[in-house]
Image (cartoon, helix red, strand yellow):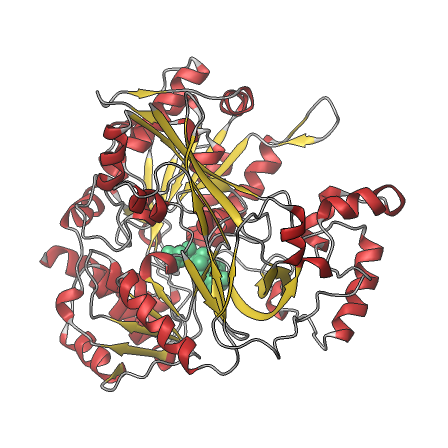
């Protein structure tokens, strides 16, 4: 029996797509009514000037069309450079199709939803059709792709994979094998130019042991379950890094490391300390700096995000803060079904759904989205609950398309730029009257397929910063259903309906990778794996806005395999282009120190 897991947003969506003019008018009206002014980020228009190292990479990738691994410490601009590479590669490889539209032969992917969002791509599972990846009992993998995905493989000229440090070696080999077979080209990656990006000193890939138990039991698992999410707080063995894959040595010609740290540009002392921590080293200077930012008395504060090693600590922290907040609480309870219920596999599949059993919310709650809702609202987007609204107070996308579509010239392409929610009379979503609501007002997503139930239900309104539009947006958050079915009989063995949300005053470090925070608290109590301390601390721009709780130098751990790999294969770009970055040359001479540190180990 095969099982697979997928999640599908319900038909009942919270957005409508209107033409630009209507959306603009309504938006103006609605922002007045709610006294809500979207904040435009002035940084939007600031153009980045790429330094020599970054330009070297652009030339190598775009003009010389080489396959590379791009690395560098946290905040060295890997993501920013990757975005530029993607733009240029799309320009280079874009071709017009039969309908005179541009198609790009550049597959943009990442190992996590959030990383994919940052570069305008998809997770590699969905982009490459690996949702259908099977690992059977003999360990052999089958390739099974639909026509669209096999076409994408055939046409692909460049494949980008971001946050590759979280990808297992066997997955990279499987991608290589798939590319070869789909393209009938037996050069590495089927002849596709490959750009891998990430930092192996950050979080490692995690083993998929728990899920493999289920795979064995049900013969095969065809799944959209992200192992890094499922196992995030388990002390599981680290599996092989992608650089240990068979394809790496002959498929990736250059391993290049950016050396200028931009994120902490104004705090060179911190940059120096982070570069040590990255290598698992705590010098007396770093020890002194950490002691300086350490807080002896722990105060749970709602103003600053706190990063923890485990989910349990995160959940305790979030509940503590929620309790201190004024106002009534609305608890959204999940609804489950399927024959797996009450079996020993239930807990695992339930956890893998990434939907909470119970979500307590108050107005002002800080939350994070845990599923990709659409192009603007991604797994990892953080924001605040600013109100609650009933289903009857706003239209669904289908209703709007049905009623207004033809007259309003609705253009689905405009979606992301012009999405906004309205109530029945065209006003912005209204706040639900909570005056009668006593504490623990519980809403369960029961009979959610029923249209009346959907209309009567209560939903949270989420305010978040849209980095594409550079302004604050509001969305009604609707539940999603995750279902697990046998693939042969297509019998649903488990399903769950719940809002794709979690509280986010405290987050696990896994959820913070790739993020930048203005201020941050890091609780070292239960850090348990390599790279955690470095990832956590490097999220903030300066030690001025950093508080460390339960500092413990023993939690600063780096994997020796990564050091070996770097020593043997990775070239520092500042040495290649014959420059030293402003920070390394003028202030810390970090490059030299890094080499000395590597030599010491
Ligand atoms: N050439 C540049 N000039 C000025 N600022 C830059 C430049 N390149 C990147 N930055 C800035 O540096 C910061 C960090 O960049 P980015 O997020 O791309 O780093 P990263 O290497 O991907 O970090 P992480 O490994 O933590 O994900 C961003 O604020 C970005 O705008």
Whether residue 6 is visible, yes or no, is: yes
Compare residues 186 and 513 and report the one nearer the observer: 513
Rendered residue at 44%/79% (across/down)? 303
Q: Position of residue 355 (x, y in %)?
A: 42, 52
Q: Position of residue 179 (x, y in %)?
A: 41, 22
Q: Is residue 553 above or below residue 168?
A: below
Looking at the rendering, the quadrant in which ligand 1 lies is bottom left
Rendered residue at 59%/47% (across/down)? 374
Quarter assignment of residue 250:
top left
Compare residues 39 and 494 and report the one nearer the observer: 494
Compare residues 322 and 278 and report the one nearer the observer: 322
Which residue sits furthest right?
407
**Direction from residue 383 to residue 39 in the image, left or right:** right
**Direction from residue 299 to residue 14 in the image, left or right:** right
**Direction from residue 349 to residue 335 in the image, left or right:** right
Quadrant in which the C terminus appears: bottom left
Quadrant in which the N terminus appears: top left
Q: Is residue 144 above or below residue 369?
A: above
Rendered residue at 39%/18% (across/down)? 180
Q: Is residue 232 above or below residue 90?
A: below
């Amino acid at each position: 029996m095969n099982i697979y897991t997928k999640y599908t947003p319900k038909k009942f969506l919270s957005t409508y797509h209107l033409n630009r003019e209507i959306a603009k008018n309504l938006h103006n009206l609605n922002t007045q009514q709610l006294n809500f002014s979207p904040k435009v980020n002035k940084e939007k228009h600031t153009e980045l000037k790429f330094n020599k190292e970054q330009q070297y990479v652009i030339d190598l990738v775009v003009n010389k069309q080489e396959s590379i691994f791009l690395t560098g410490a946290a905040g060295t601009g890997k993501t920013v450079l990757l975005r530029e590479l993607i733009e240029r590669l799309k320009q280079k490889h874009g071709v017009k199709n039969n309908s005179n539209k541009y198609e790009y032969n550049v597959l943009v992917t990442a190992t996590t939803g959030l990383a994919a969002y940052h570069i305008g791509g998809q997770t590699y599972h969905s982009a490459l059709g690996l949702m259908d990846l099977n690992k059977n009992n003999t360990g052999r993998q089958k390739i099974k792709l639909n026509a669209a995905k096999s076409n994408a493989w055939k046409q692909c000229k460049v494949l980008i994979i971001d946050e590759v440090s979280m990808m297992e070696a066997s997955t990279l080999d499987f991608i290589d094998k798939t590319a070869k077979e789909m393209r009938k080209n037996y050069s590495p990656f089927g002849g596709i130019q490959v750009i891998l990006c990430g930092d192996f000193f950050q979080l490692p890939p995690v083993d998929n042991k728990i899920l493999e138990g289920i795979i064995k039991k049900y013969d095969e698992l065809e799944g959209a379950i992200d192992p890094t999410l499922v196992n995030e707080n388990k002390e599981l063995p680290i599996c092989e890094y992608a650089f240990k894959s068979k394809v790496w040595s002959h498929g990736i010609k250059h391993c290049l490391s950016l050396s200028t740290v931009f994120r902490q540009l104004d705090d060179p002392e911190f940059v120096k300390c982070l570069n040590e921590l990255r290598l698992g080293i705590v010098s007396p200077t770093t020890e002194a700096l950490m002691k300086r930012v350490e807080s002896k008395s722990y105060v749970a504060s709602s103003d600053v995000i706190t990063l923890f090693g485990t989910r349990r600590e995160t959940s305790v922290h979030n509940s503590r803060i929620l309790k201190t907040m004024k106002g009534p609480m609305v608890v959204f309870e999940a609804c489950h079904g399927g024959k797996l219920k009450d079996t020993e596999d239930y807990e695992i599949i339930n956890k893998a759904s990434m939907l909470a059993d119970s979500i307590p919310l108050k107005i002002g709650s800080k939350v994070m989205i845990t599923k990709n809702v659409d192009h603007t609202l991604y797994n990892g987007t953080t924001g605040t609950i600013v109100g609650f609204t009933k289903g009857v107070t706003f239209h669904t996308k289908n209703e709007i398309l049905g009623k207004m579509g033809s007259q309003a010239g609705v253009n689905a392409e405009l979606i992301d730029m012009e999405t906004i929610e309205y109530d029945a009379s065209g006003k912005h979503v209204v706040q639900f009257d909570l005056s009668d609501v006593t504490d623990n007002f519980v809403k369960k997503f029961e009979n959610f397929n029923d249209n009346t139930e959907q209309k009567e239900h209560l939903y949270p309104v989420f305010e978040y910063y849209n980095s594409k539009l550079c302004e604050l947006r509001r969305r009604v958050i609707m539940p999603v259903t995750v279902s697990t079915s046998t693939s042969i009989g297509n019998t649903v063995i488990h399903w769950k309906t719940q809002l794709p949300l979690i509280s986010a005053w405290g987050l696990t470090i896994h959820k913070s990778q790739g993020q930048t925070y203005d201020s941050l608290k890091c609780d070292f109590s239960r850090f348990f794996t390599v790279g955690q301390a470095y990832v956590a601390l490097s999220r903030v721009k300066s030690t001025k806005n950093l508080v460390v709780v339960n500092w413990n130098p023993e939690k600063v751990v780096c994997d020796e395999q990564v050091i070996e790999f770097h020593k043997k294969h990775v070239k520092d770009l500042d040495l290649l282009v014959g420059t030293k970055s402003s920070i390394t040359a003028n202030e810390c001479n970090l490059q030299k120190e890094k080499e000395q540190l590597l030599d010491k180990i």
